[in-house]
Amino acid sequence: MIDHPPRLSLLDRSRTRAGETEAASLRGTVARAVHAERLGYHRFWVAEHHGVPGIAGSAPAVLLAAVAGATTTVRIGSAGVMLPHHQPLVVAEQFATLSAFAPGRVDLGLGRSPGFTAPVRRALRQTDGDFSADIVELREFLTGTAEITLHPRPPAPLPLYVLATGTGLGVAAGLGLPVIVGGPLLGIGGDPEPGLAALAGYRRAFRPSPQQPEPWVAISVDVLVADTAAEAADLLLPEAWAMARSRTTGEFPPLEPVDVIRAASRTPRQQRYLDQTAAAAITGTPARVGSALAELLDRTGAAELVATGSTFDRAALAASDAELAALFARPPAHPGVGLPALQLPEPDHAR
């Protein structure tokens, strides 16, 4: 066993699949959470998307209630609730209610991504609010320091996280909150220096808070594990193809089987997007994935890995989740395989 491994968690976006109902996609998310708990994952995250054909997860608090009812020990959280779409009081009430059913297990991740399309943004009545001020207001409701008393009162402290890209890191540092970062900030398949500089800036500017006395970083990346590199590449293909189509046709479709994707024609532009998605993910055999993750966790100083991979084949995804969990649970069989015993900071509530 690794003495002090980073935390390991999953983010499931409730991706829909061709030929499957959206209700089945939501049930699949709950089933994946149950499996993650059995595998020893520390945390299970769900997300918020509106009006996206390929994603059924639009209501994190409601979906997490179903996850809470099916699990007993794994932490559950939103990654995240898009705060510009909601009133802070309503978010506080929803997650305080959720915490009443799963005391001590609920985490509230907050983001500010805009709606998928202009009609979605209009339907959400989205405004250019003050993200930092909204977080402060939300935190005051949860800690009982607002002018309105929250009901129900949370039975245990409800930790906040910030999904951060760019200026979000500054918001989190100023408020003394942990961050979850992904995408270009990780520098996978590209230049890592800008992301490292941004994380260093967050750590320098961090102001301790009652929740978080020191800077804390989680990294979010697509991770898929299989027996061979080719099989792992096939696992990534459905998500990569959906991303390529969204960037070239404007529609983010349900996941499709690998053989259907291979038979489909694609433009050079779509092939470039496929290649970009593959370069930004970590896929392959357990040995290859373990080595790549060890390097990434060491480079970023991350205290938690949030694995975000998805694929059409649910059985293959479950097997990948199991292989990833095993990497965090067993000592390396060879140099560079598995994860190092990193001495990384954790939030007080996670100790």
Image (cartoon, helix red, strand yellow):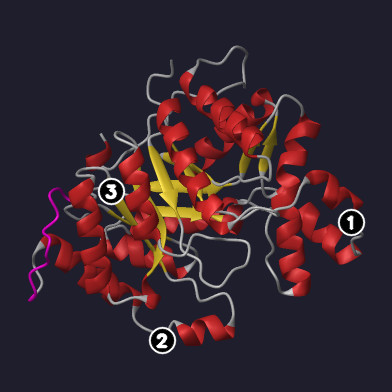
Residue 92 drawn at (x, y percent):
23, 65
Q: Residue furthest top?
A: 333
Q: Earlier in the sequence, mark 2 or mark 1?
A: 2
Span of residues in magenta: 147-158
Left or right relative to 131: residue 230 = right
Q: Name the residue rendered at 46%, 65% in the picture.
A: 58
Q: Disc 2 on helix, strand or loop?
A: loop
Judge by depth and name the residue closer to the eye, 9 or 169.
9
Which residue position is annotated with label 1?
264
Q: CA distance from mark 2 to mark 1?
A: 40 Å
Q: Earlier in the sequence, mark 3 or mark 1?
A: 3
Which residue position is annotated with label 2?
127
Residue type at the position of mark 1:
Ala
Residue type at the position of mark 3:
Val
Residue 168 drawn at (x, y percent):
42, 66
Q: Disc 1 on helix, strand or loop?
A: loop
